[in-house]
Amino acid sequence: MADHPTLFLPGPTEVDLELREIMATPLVGHRSAGFVAATQQLCARLKPLFQTTANAAFETCPATAMMEAAVRNLVPHGGMTLHLAGGAFSERWATIAGACGRKPESLTATWGTAHDPQQLKERLQKGHKPAAVMITHNETSTGVLQPLRELAAVVREHAPEAMVCVDAVTSLAGADLQFDAWGIDIAFAGTQKCLALPPGLTVFALSERALRAAANVPDRGFLFDFVKAVPETVSGKPLATPCVPLVFALLRQLERIEKETLPARFARHHEMRAAMRSWAQQNAIEPYVSAEAARSPTVSCYRASGRDVKAMAERASNAGYKIDQGYGDLKGKTFRIGHMGDHTVARLQACLKSLL
């Protein structure tokens, strides 16, 4: 057995030794010339990750904080937000909007199913248009991948003034996300998912349109004020002290991703999804997400199918792996495996072999 359990959780996921060693190196001052240069380089390297020529930056925070930042910066107080709900994290975003004094409304899909762009079109054609539409690209609680390109296109056509806000927490660097081509205004992800690093940083892309809109929204706060924070971070000088070790590790990880290439990385994640499905079919285990096109390439959610999920997790643990026993009300009824980041098909198959 390895010196630690290999994480096949939906996050945090496994971190390679090279990246852990980078984070163990001595600290430097966050205003030192070397770190300023590293921060500038990091922001530049984030652009191809999001497939954008717009703004790209990061904050030292969980991705949930960026959900709140998007609301506070892009939606005036009392403004309406439309949330494409269908899982724990998409529903959380609506809760956050309400807590920030906005007026959240939800277009809800049954858990385990993707949103229908036609239904979104019909919703937007009725009544008051939202200031922003919140889309969770990959719903971590259920393993559903939304048709983001099609959904964003509907918003652009039928509510052109609305901001297209995307939670890409478990999709960025694991599933295709074309920020510019798909007309997205903000997308964000934590480092502990497909970027295969510890939690601590949230990376994000922001359109010029969104940055202009934020300038007209009062009471944006301080640390997450896009109008000030984005240019300061891009210049190499974040408003507050960032997680220095993670910045260096992320910079190295982006170099590794560029070497692998995004198409190859996406293909590897699809291969792991296929390996997961093949194993499940062989063992008569049913997917929680019935529609194949909606199954995430990064997080697989499967029904217990009469099996003891807790016992499966214990067998995995004894073999040196960690899996998830289902989220919230789905605990024990489903199990989730996060095959994301730097995992390989061979390592996933070794984990799956231990479950039964």
Image (tube, rainbow, N blue to C red):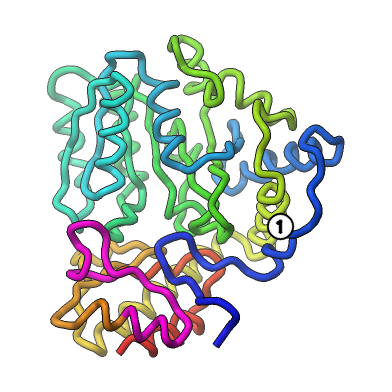
Question: What residue lies at 28% left-to-right and 16% top-to-bottom?
Answer: 79
Residue 35, by quadrant, is top right
Whether residue 18 sits left or right of residue 305 in the image: it is right
Instruction: Count the labels in the image.
Output: 1
Q: Amino acid at mark 1?
A: Met
Position above or below: 82 against 284: above
User: x, y percentage for residue 64?
Assistant: 41, 40
Location of the N terminus by quadrant is bottom right
The residue carrying mark 1 is 23
Viewer-closest of 334 and 299: 334
Position above or below: 74 against 65: above
User: x, y percentage for residue 307?
Assistant: 18, 83
Whether residue 60 sits left or right of residue 248 in the image: it is left
Question: What residue lies at 36% left-to-right and 48% top-to-bottom?
Answer: 137
The magenta segment: 313-335
Residue 324, by quadrant, is bottom left
Query: Around disc 1, counting alpha carbons within 10 Å, would you say few (fewer than 14), some (14 to 19), or many (20 or more)?
Result: many
**Secondary structure type for disc 1:** helix
